[in-house]
Image: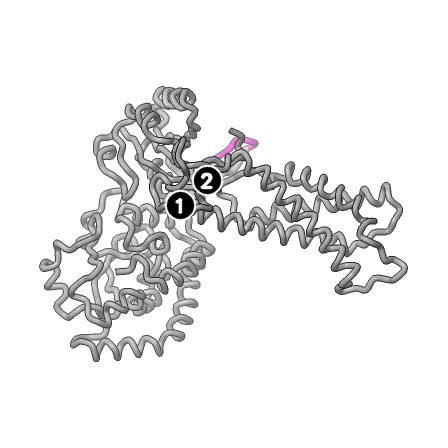
């Protein structure tokens, strides 16, 4: 299959009617119909859509220039009808198809963002229009409007940008039903394998569904990691390919296993499954690598995955500024909450609890009290109601909650006093949620990597499912955040937290 054709657009299983995804909700009729479209048609349909929109943009540009006459009136002596521009419009369609092709506009890349696509479209459109202007100057003495060509570039970029935004939104919707998703089998559950797992968990927009993983270590191949299923040793590889629908096998084995890797690649080729290998290069990610050259010789150095140096200063300044702004904005709400707590049940307004922060340092975390005063003493009474996985302790309808506390938990308003922890430098606005000391004591070795950054009020797992996720999935997302931090990621998480809080999904 050509790399420009995204896979996984058809039914979840060969011969399926398309009415239901393999692991997901029943498909609406329109989704089921789309699932039956051969994936090889999508690139051609995209080119056809772009061609139509380019034609519409060119006609609109003519209309704006010669009929609406925005910004600058047209001298009556230079009035030109649309038919005069028709040869240029047809030439533009051909030129832009060539420009888009060679500029990589149609090159399929899963991790390309909408802004990157728009940037590529704008550059390729500008190039095509400049070539058209040169051709017109060389072969047609008629004076064309320069503003019309400028409008054309802007309108084509705008219309195709909106088209790509719609495609991104529709693709995200379809993936909820297993359409446009590649089912992935992971070979190797060590550090590299978990790196792949947390990327798949953190970025559902990539369109990967991990059906499970294989590993020869008995301690790893017998225990699921969150919702990622342990499928036994690597020798099960051929059987899994035959009994499961696998679109892609990602092999994350150490370099010593080159013979095993060769055998797995051969098995994939026999059954027509794509295979990709993650190179075992010191188990580092792109964000951890710094590449320099010594007379053409690549030199790779490793930097810390934690947020340090200027990045730490930038994040701290951002935390302080935004915490002060939020604190002043919600102060009246905080006073109302405090009054409601005092009227609802006896006890203090604020609840203090020891949590573990960055590098394993304990600190006192503040919350609005949402439970009765003796809630900690009554924990053993409700121990059998625990719904969380791993070391966590969470109950969806905790009988120890007060009436006001239940509403506060539902809307996450009990977390507001943690702005104090942020201003004191013990927490950040965004980061892993801090756990209790007894919970941290139960961490596995790989879990401890989440302690490399300051804990936060919200984080990546809060926008990916909140308490509905398993503990292992939470840790995968926390480590992904630590390895891929940026100010843009913090802003994205903060903005995405707002609708999650308002809807109250997964909060308890």
Coordinates of residue 386 in the picture (x, y in percent): 17, 54
Rendered residue at 63%/45% (across/down): 50
Q: What x and y, as percent, mark residue 98?
A: 68, 37
Comparing 89 with 107, the one in front is: 89
Quadrant, the C terminus: bottom left
Colouring method of the image: one colour
Q: Which residue is mark 2?
A: 35
Q: Which type of secondary structure does the marked residue at label 2 adopt?
A: helix
Q: Are marks 2 and 1 in contact (CB under 8 Å)?
A: yes
| Residue 194 sits in quarter | top left
First to last magenta residue range: 295-300
The quarter of the picture where residue 26 lies is: top left
Q: Nearer the viewer, residue 431 or 124?
A: 124
Depth check, front residue: 22 or 54: 22
* Quarter where residue 335 is shown: bottom left
Q: Residues within 10 Å of mark 1 (few under 14, many from 20)?
A: some
Residue 466 shows in this picture: yes
Q: Which residue shows up at 70% across the image and 48% down it?
A: 55
Q: Residues within 10 Å of mark 2 (few under 14, many from 20)?
A: many
Predominant secondary structure, magenta span: strand
Indicate left or right for 350 with 287 as reference.
left
Question: Does 299 appear in magenta?
Answer: yes
Residue 363 is left or right of residue 122, and the answer is left
Is residue 422 in the magenta section?
A: no
Residue on which the image places disc 1: 27
């Amino acid at each position: 299959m050509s790399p420009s054709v995204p896979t996984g657009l058809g039914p979840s299983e060969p011969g399926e009617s398309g009415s239901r995804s393999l692991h997901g909700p029943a498909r609406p009729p329109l989704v089921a119909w789309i699932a039956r479209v051969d994936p090889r048609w999508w690139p051609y349909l995209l080119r056809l859509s772009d061609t139509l929109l380019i034609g519409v943009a060119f006609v609109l540009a003519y209309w704006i220039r010669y009929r609406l006459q925005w910004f600058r009136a047209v001298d009556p002596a230079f009035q030109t009808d649309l038919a005069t521009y028709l040869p240029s419009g047809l030439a533009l369609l051909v030129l832009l198809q060539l420009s888009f092709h060679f500029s990589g506009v149609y090159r399929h890349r899963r991790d390309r963002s909408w802004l990157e696509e728009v940037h590529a479209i704008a550059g390729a459109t500008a190039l095509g229009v400049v070539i058209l202007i040169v051709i017109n100057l060389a072969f047609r003495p008629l004076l064309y409007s320069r503003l019309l060509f400028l409008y054309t570039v802007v309108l084509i970029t705008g219309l195709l940008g909106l088209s790509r935004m719609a495609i991104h939104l529709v693709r995200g919707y379809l993936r909820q039903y297993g359409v446009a998703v590649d089912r992935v089998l992971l070979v190797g559950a060590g550090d590299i394998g978990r790196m792949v797992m947390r990327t798949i968990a953190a970025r559902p927009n990539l369109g990967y569904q991990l059906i499970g993983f294989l590993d020869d270590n008995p301690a790893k191949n017998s225990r699921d990691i969150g919702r990622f299923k342990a499928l036994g040793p690597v020798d099960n590889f051929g059987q899994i390919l035959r009994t499961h629908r696998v679109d892609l096998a990602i092999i994350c084995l150490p370099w010593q296993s080159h013979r095993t890797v060769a055998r797995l690649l051969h098995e994939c080729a026999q059954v027509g499954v794509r295979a990709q290998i993650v190179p075992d290069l010191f188990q580092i990610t792109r964000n951890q690598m710094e590449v320099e050259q010594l007379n053409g010789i690549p030199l790779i150095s490793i930097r810390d995955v934690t947020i340090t140096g200027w990045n730490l200063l930038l994040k701290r300044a951002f935390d302080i500024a935004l915490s002060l702004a939020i604190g002043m904005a919600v102060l009246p709400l905080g006073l109302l909450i405090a009054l409601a707590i005092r009227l609802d049940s006896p006890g203090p307004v604020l609840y203090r609890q020891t949590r573990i922060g960055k590098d394993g340092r304990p600190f006192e975390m503040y919350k609005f009290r949402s439970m009765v005063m003796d809630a900690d003493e009554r924990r053993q009474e409700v121990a059998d109601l625990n719904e969380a996985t791993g070391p966590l302790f969470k109950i969806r309808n905790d009988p120890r909650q007060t009436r006001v506390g239940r509403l506060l938990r539902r809307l996450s308003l009990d977390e507001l006093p943690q702005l104090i922890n942020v201003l004191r430098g013990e927490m950040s606005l965004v980061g892993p949620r801090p756990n209790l000391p007894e919970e941290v004591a139960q961490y596995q070795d790989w879990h401890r990597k989440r302690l490399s950054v300051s804990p936060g009020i919200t984080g990546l797992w809060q926008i990916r499912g909140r308490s509905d996720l398993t503990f292992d999935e939470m840790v995968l997302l926390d480590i992904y955040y630590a390895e891929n931090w940026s100010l843009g990621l913090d802003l994205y998480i903060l903005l995405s937290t707002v609708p999650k809080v308002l809807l109250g999904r997964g909060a308890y």
